[in-house]
Amino acid sequence: MSLLMQYLIALSMLTLSSACEAQSIENLMNSRDKREMTRLVNQARKQGVYCGKTWKKPVGAIKWDDQLEKSALDKSYDMYKNNYFAHSSPDGKNLSDRLKKINYAWWTIGENLAKGPTSVKQTVENWLKSEGHCINIMKPEYTHFGAAHYGDYWTQVFAKPKK
């Protein structure tokens, strides 16, 4: 096989890989998963829960926000692609920076991360068992949220938007 042919094959494989990666990042949570996460989060908010040893009284329902879902997907994908697990990315960007980039105006924001769960139910259950994550879910100030996962990296973004 000629060197030119090897180069063309390698280039086409790289292009195909990049196209698949770009297509995958555009795949947001399906409607069933969105409904399930919204149901589980609002069930906890409606009933009230213990976050660690602290009882969090019932609070109002929270609404799904597609912009926050996209921000969550960007975060999950970035952690997957760059092999890290933290609220700040290796280049120092955080949730505030990501929301500013998409012109999302907010009064207050929060973020939950998870690595490893394989389902929406398992992810929400784990967050509710973790004091800090549970407190985010139960904050009455948050009126909107979105979530997404890429691989086994999960992100949940909360906000009270300025609207």
Image (tube, helix red, strand yellow):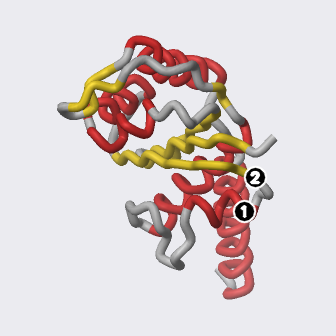
Residue 145 placement (x, y as % from top left): 60, 36
- Name the residue beneath numbered marker 2: 104
Report the residue marked by disc 1.
100
The correct choice, above or below, for 107 with respect to 18 in the image is: above
**Residue drawn at (68%, 46%) of the image:** 70
| Towards the viewer: 41 or 36 | 41
- Contact between marks 1 and 2 (CB within 8 A): the answer is yes
Q: Badge 1, how many Cα within 10 Å: few under 14, some, many 20+? A: few
| Mark identifier at residue 160 | none
Q: Amino acid at mark 2?
A: Tyr
Give the left or right position of residue 145, taking residue 149 as reference.
right
- State whether residue 87 is above or below residue 135: below
Residue 151 at least partly seen: no
Residue 4 at what x, y percent from top left?
A: 74, 85
Q: Residue placed at 72% from the left, 62% from the top?
A: 100
SS state under label 1: helix
Please give the name of the residue rendered at 64% of the width and 51% of the height, measured from the top-left corner: 71
Q: CA distance from mark 1 to mark 2?
A: 6 Å
69 to the left or right of 49: right
- Looking at the figure, which quarter contains the N terminus? bottom right
Residue 152 placement (x, y as % from top left): 41, 45
Residue type of the residue flagged with mark 1: Lys
Q: Is residue 95 in sight in this rendering?
A: yes
Of residues 83 and 37, the one drawn nearer to the viewer in this rendering: 37
- Give the camera-side residue of 135 and 91: 135
Q: Which SS class for mark 2?
A: loop
